[in-house]
């Protein structure tokens, strides 16, 4: 599907999208990932010393907190020391992030509680998939607009099992490549990355991203999913295969258990792999919590474990 690139961001043609974004963000705290770690002058780095580390950017998925569509999600997140962000769902909830007034309410609450929205997930409307729906491109553009208004830097573009292309069959993957190539300029204009999370192997993800060949299309890497979808032997090595240049964000989970407990993934080895490629993006927890009342304690433990094993020096 070819996406019409005619700007349709606002109903008032005299009010440009760029002017709107500039006005909307003036005087507020930047919530994109790049605002978290200020750049240091070389002399400042030297003074900081070799033991100083890049602050970890850790967030939690609203869906995992059982708080989709609940503006109280930021208040709860604020109670967890070390947690900086919440990943929201676009199409879930009522009203959801297809409604611009709702988006603005979320932005207001995020700013109120000092919590970032580093990424958006759940971009497809019910029944829509990247391969089988003519409106998939429209859903992406709508989600890009929501991400820009919220200051999010990544959109999770999900496609699993039958919705994922066969990367050995050009007839299967070519339409997906074309759709992502068409959507990428919109993402670039909004300062957003389309992060692909799927059931493909790391090798096939590398092939897909390289075929799209646009800096705004990368992989949202989920080590646990790699193992869950049958690529367990490639899950950790896949970090190095894709590298920092292709991985935009990372999901962290161990079903309903703590990250440090035995599971499908050796998370110590996985975090070491991320350290080796000098990954310095967001880690978003996706633990399966039973309800939002049981989120705080396990998340605090997971954060402490992450701090122990992710020890990126200043660069």
Image (tube, rainbow, N blue to C red):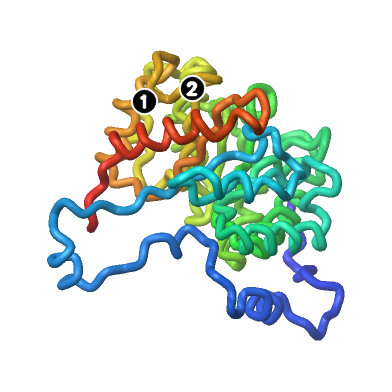
Give residue 72's position: percent from left, percent from top: 70, 47
Of mark 1 and mark 2, the one earlier in the sequence is: 2
Identify the image quadrant of residue 157.
top right
| 19 shown above or below 46 | below
Q: Which mark is residue 24?
A: none
Label 1, residues with CA under 10 Å away: few <14, some 14-19, many ≥20: many
Give residue 131's position: percent from left, percent from top: 71, 35
The residue drawn where x is 67% and y is 28% is 291
**Residue tagged 2:** 254
Q: Nearer the viewer, residue 102 or 291?
A: 291
Disc 2, SS = loop
Q: Can residue 114 be seen in the rendering of this structure?
A: yes
Q: Is residue 185 left or right of residue 145?
A: left
| 157 shown above or below 198 | below
| 198 shown above or below 92 | above
Q: Is residue 267 left or right of residue 194?
A: left
The residue drawn where x is 80% and y is 48% is 96
Label 2, residues with CA under 10 Å away: few <14, some 14-19, many ≥20: many
The residue drawn where x is 75% and y is 60% is 105
Disc 1/disc 2 C-alpha distance (Å): 9 Å
Disc 1, SS = helix
Identify the image quadrant of residue 160.
top right
The residue drawn where x is 43% and y is 32% is 302
Q: Check whether the beta carbons of the residues at disc 1 and disc 2 lie within 8 A of each other.
A: yes
Q: Nearer the viewer, residue 175 or 269?
A: 269
Q: Nearer the viewer, residue 191 or 25?
A: 25
Question: Please, which residue is most extreme toward the bottom here?
Answer: 14
Q: Which mark is residue 267?
A: 1
Give residue 262's position: percent from left, percent from top: 40, 14
Give residue 289's position: percent from left, percent from top: 61, 26
């Amino acid at each position: 599907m070819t996406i019409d690139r005619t700007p349709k961001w606002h109903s008032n043609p005299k009010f440009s999208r760029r002017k709107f974004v500039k006005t909307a963000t003036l005087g507020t705290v930047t919530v994109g990932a790049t605002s978290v770690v200020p750049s240091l002058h070389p002399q400042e780095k030297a003074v900081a010393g070799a033991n100083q580390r890049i602050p970890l950017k850790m967030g939690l998925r609203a869906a995992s907190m059982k708080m989709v569509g609940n503006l109280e999600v930021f208040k709860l997140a604020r109670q967890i020391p070390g947690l900086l962000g919440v990943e929201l769902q676009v199409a879930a909830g009522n009203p959801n992030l297809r409604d611009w007034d709702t988006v603005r309410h979320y932005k207001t609450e995020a700013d109120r509680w000092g919590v970032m929205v580093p990424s958006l997930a759940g971009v497809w409307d019910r029944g829509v998939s990247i391969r089988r729906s003519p409106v998939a491109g429209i859903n992406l553009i709508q989600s890009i607009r929501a991400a820009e208004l919220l200051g999010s830097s990544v959109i999770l573009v999900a496609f699993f099992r039958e919705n994922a292309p066969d990367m050995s069959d050009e007839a299967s993957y070519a339409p997906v490549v074309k759709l992502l190539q068409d959507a990428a300029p919109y993402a670039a204009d909004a300062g957003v990355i389309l992060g692909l999370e799927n059931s493909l192997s790391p090798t096939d993800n590398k092939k897909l991203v390289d075929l799209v060949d646009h800096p705004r299309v990368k992989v949202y890497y989920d080590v646990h999913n790699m193992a869950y979808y049958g690529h367990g032997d490639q899950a950790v090595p896949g970090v190095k295969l894709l590298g920092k240049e292709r991985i935009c964000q990372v999901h962290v989970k161990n079903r309903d258990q703590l990250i440090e407990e035995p599971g499908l993934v050796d998370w110590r080895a996985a975090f070491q792999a991320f350290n080796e490629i000098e990954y310095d993006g967001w880690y978003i927890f996706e633990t399966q919590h039973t309800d939002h009342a049981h989120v705080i304690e396990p998340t605090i433990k997971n954060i402490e474990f992450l701090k122990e094993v992710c020890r990126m020096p200043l660069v």
